[in-house]
Amino acid sequence: MAKAFPSTNKKFPEPPATAASVTALFVGFVATLPALIQTERDLCGYSGQDPAVDHWIATADGALAQTRAACEAMIAAPAIDEAERAFQAVARLFLRVIRSEDPDEVAGLRAHVQLRRWAWLVPGDGAGARDLNIWIGAALDALETWLSLEDPCDARVEDWDHSGLDGDISPSA
């Protein structure tokens, strides 16, 4: 008697796509920061009155959205170790700054990062921790650069408001 063997090839399901690691997402996040800083820098001094600048504003908004999405993806991914939790903490810091509408809160966060930078770093003396901390340092440096961008027009307007200033008087020799 012949034994029947099924002639159909069974297809095994492909393994589910693994989520990107927090570390890989952090590298992608850091890669978004130069565009965020540059687009914001391009808008320094803009008073909001020129519709021709709408393109630059849209570009800056797009860079901000890209950074925000990178942070959200990193926070949503499962962290497997202390280094990845440190990366997520930096992402949460950026999201807090991005979402905040309170200048005092942002100033407090900025001061915290400046004074307690060590709190954001991965502990350890090994080469791995050193390399990871270089990435964290780059992100915190970018945050500092981004937050230090000021609108030169706003600063001048405050100076111009003082009644003692006269633009026609040159400095004495």
Image (cartoon, helix red, strand yellow):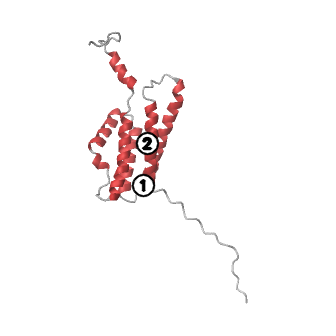
Quarter where residue 24 is shown: bottom left
Question: 102 above or below 21?
Answer: above
- Measured from the top left, where is residue 154 in percent x and y? 38, 23
Instruction: Give the farthest residue toward the right.
Output: 1
Q: Above or below — where is 105 with respect to 170?
A: below
Can residue 148 be seen here? The reply is yes
Q: Which numbered circle lies on residue 162?
A: none
Quadrant where the C terminus is found in the figure: top left
Name of the residue lying farthest toward the front? 173
The secondary element bearing badge 2 is classed as helix
Q: Earlier in the sequence, mark 2 or mark 1?
A: 1
Q: Residue 130, located in which quarter of the rendered image?
A: bottom left
Q: Is residue 89 something that shows in the picture? A: no
Question: How far apart are labels 2 and 1 at the CA level?
Answer: 16 Å
- Residue 11 image point, x, y percent: 63, 69
| Residue that numbered label 1 is attached to | 23
**Three-letter amino acid code of the residue under disc 2:** Leu
Depth check: 75 or 169 in front?
A: 169
Q: Please provide percent x and percent y for residue 128.
A: 35, 58
Three-letter residue code for mark 1? Thr
Number of residues whose C-alpha sits closer than 10 Å to that of mark 2, classed few (under 14), some (14–19) or many (20 or more): many
Q: From what the image shows, is residue 163 above or below residue 74?
A: above
Mark number, residue 33 = 2
In this view of the protein, which residue sits in the foreground, 133 or 5? 133
What residue is rendered at 37% in x and 20% in y?
157
